[in-house]
Amino acid sequence: MRNKLSIVMMLVLAATFCRGAWSQVYPAKPVRLVVPFSAGGGADIFARLVGRKLGENMGQSFVVDNRAGASGIIGCELVARAAPDGYTLLMGTTGTHTTNPAVFSKLPYDPLKDFAPISLVAESPFVLLVHPSLPVKSVQELIAFAKTRPGQITYGSSGIGSSSHLGFELFNMMAGIKGVHVPYKGLAPATLDTVSGNLIMTWNSITAAAPYIRDKRLRALGIGSTKRSKLMPDIPTIAESGLKGYELGSWYGIFAPAGTPPEIVRRLHNELVKAIASPDISEQLVALGAEPVGSTPEAFVAVLKRDLVKWQKVAREANVKAE
């Protein structure tokens, strides 16, 4: 009996030693950072920024792998099913982990159970844009204008069930108005149709919208963040403009597959927070209209749970479904 106990203890110690040694040498080969969207978007840009910095600091390449399709579902499923060894990571977003679960009846991944959150990278608020010919110059004026024209105010989103769509549904609920949803394949065409006057309003990131705002081809009424943007501080938040508690934007964060050893998650978290806080990365994020974050895994989980509840409620009450 004593010999058996000794063997068990030796195996436990060996496993502990191997796990510790593994974390010390990690990463021993290039790491794949999956972006579940096409190149050029926010998730791709942020992944390349932090991936390059992680590679410099950790001595291995972090290779961005764009796996676009099905509202980010394809790339998320790939990572959820990957080996939990720290060599396949995901740049997840508000859409992939909170609005998709709210509008799709079935997903091939669970946003909480199938991933190990490492850290939020950045938050990028949406800005509410209207055609300059519209006789409104504030969120309150827009709401008053829309209330006299129920069912006549058109708004464009990046697709049914997208963050921009649900954001308008939440706006309508809180403001007590009713608009006409026009889905597009992305916010770029929705923005262009607002510039041309085919739409009354849409959302976009403050970075993408800035040229149109500066040239006065679009009017910015409010930003969906909790505080004003450093990029365009003259734009008030929607919350301070009358819709208290309103918040809309995209967050971006790094996930590993569930079951990734805690030592690897801890190492990645420490390095990621350090990369985000470095002046060259944080300054670039701010220049892109984003707010650098760098959070604990626990804080990241809290954001996930909060937004899941928020968007499930909006989707249910507005009867928004995507298939």
Image (cartoon, rainbow, N blue to C red):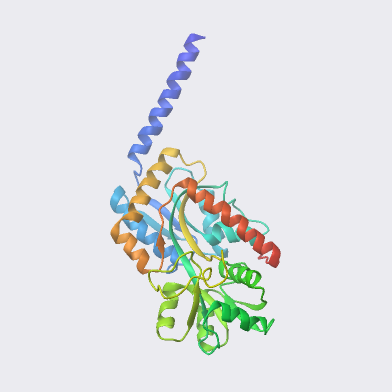
**Residue 128 coordinates in the image, percent (x, y):** 52, 75
Kindly identify the residue that appears in the image at 52 percent across and 9 percent down: 1
Q: Nearer the viewer, residue 292 or 22?
A: 292
**Residue 291 coordinates in the image, percent (x, y):** 41, 62
**Residue 184 coordinates in the image, percent (x, y):** 57, 76
Is 210 rendered above or below residue 318?
Answer: below
Q: Say which quarter of the image contains residue 134.
A: bottom right
- The answer to whether residue 30 is seen in the rendering is no
Q: Nearer the viewer, residue 321 or 122?
A: 122
Q: Nearer the viewer, residue 315 or 55?
A: 315
* Count of residue discs: 0
Q: Say which quarter of the image contains residue 215.
A: bottom left
* Quadrant location, the C terminus: bottom right
Kindly identify the residue that appears in the image at 38 percent across and 69 percent down: 230
Is 170 rendered above or below residue 153?
Answer: above
- The answer to whether residue 295 is seen in the rendering is yes
**Residue 141 coordinates in the image, percent (x, y):** 57, 81
